[in-house]
Amino acid sequence: MLNDMHVVLEDEADLRYAQDLVRSAMGHVSRAHLEIVHAPEQSAADTRDIEDVVRASAKVIGRFCGRFGQIAYISWRAPGSLPSPVATCGNSRIMFIAHAPSGYILSVTLLKRARERPASVATTIAAGMVGAIAPDFDWFYFYFVDHRQTHHHKYFSHWPLCWLLLAAGSALWLRCARGSRAAFLTLVFSLGGILHVILDSVVGDVWWFAPFIDERFSLFHLHARFKPWWLNFFLHWTFALELAICAWAYYLYRRRQDDERRRGARPEID
């Protein structure tokens, strides 16, 4: 299993070769860095032609890598300049089904421990569940605006710092305005966002020190081993973790339903 593949491209032929290399290496490399360099003797017209090829190839390679099999980083630079990204796509495994249930677990746990409940049980649970999936709202931008050119975990919606600051600010707000429904719900929402990036960090890539340090972190790494691509998710041990989270949330939900039947009223959190 290769850890890195770095190919420097100087013309269209090299680019075609690199595309074939990436395709043949799927399942055998964890990341690939493709860089095309504008040779000094090339004309401006040649430069535009090559850049067009790079961008077209980025879409092709992006479709491969956008299926969460590998990382491909394609860049373009002229002599004496820094490389500018043309396309990046991710090697990280994402949580498919566990984010919303984890928000439910978080909300129920907070309600059990809260001394005061400025908001209803249902509203609090909704705030936690929405917060737990909120970072992934950036998928709309990723697909329809950015066209999968940037790993969506690099957007500010997945920066842990943003969620930590929101949680700290809402906690201070709640402390200054005791009993504030808005402050309480904002705190629950932001804690859901923090839980989201923590779960993403198990096998996914999360930029924990963004925007100050451009480096991704994850506890474990996923490599493409099976075809079709989606088997790499469902046959990975972290999918069992997702199922366990869902089962835990379902258990808590059924327990609340049992409380409702016993009391003959809307279930409360003991």
Image (cartoon, rainbow, N blue to C red):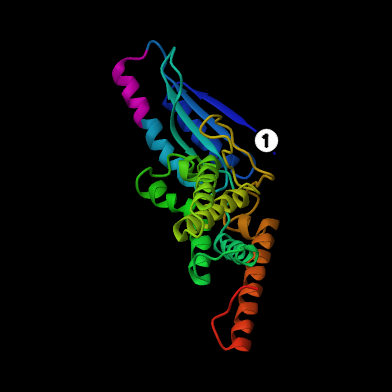
The segment highlighted magenta reads 42-52
Give percent across and percent down for residue 250.
62, 73
Left or right of 48, for residue 191 = right
* Front one among 14 and 33: 33
| Location of residue 125 with respect to 166 vertically, above or below | below
Task: Assign a secondary structure to mark 1.
Answer: loop
| Location of residue 213 with respect to 132 vertically, above or below | above
| Location of residue 228 with respect to 212 vertically, above or below | below
Give percent across and percent down for residue 234.
63, 60
Q: Residues within 10 Å of mark 1 (few under 14, many from 20)?
A: few
Give percent across and percent down for residue 109.
64, 64
Question: Residue extending furthest left?
Answer: 45
At 64% from the left edge and 48% from the top edge, which residue is drawn? 203
Give percent across and percent down for residue 66.
49, 47
Three-letter residue code for mark 1: Leu
Q: Is residue 44 magenta?
A: yes
Q: Is residue 144 magenta?
A: no
Q: Quadrant of residue 33?
A: top right
Left or right of 147, for residue 134 = right
| Location of residue 102 with respect to 154 vertically, above or below | below
Q: Quadrant of the N terminus?
A: top right
At 58% from the left edge and 46% from the top edge, which residue is drawn? 92
Q: Quadrant of the C terminus?
A: bottom right
Disc 1 marks which residue? 2
At 54% from the left edge and 50% from the top edge, which residue is drawn? 171
By secondary structure, the bulk of the magenta-drawn segment is best described as: helix
* Figure disc tally: 1
Q: Quadrant of residue 237?
A: bottom right
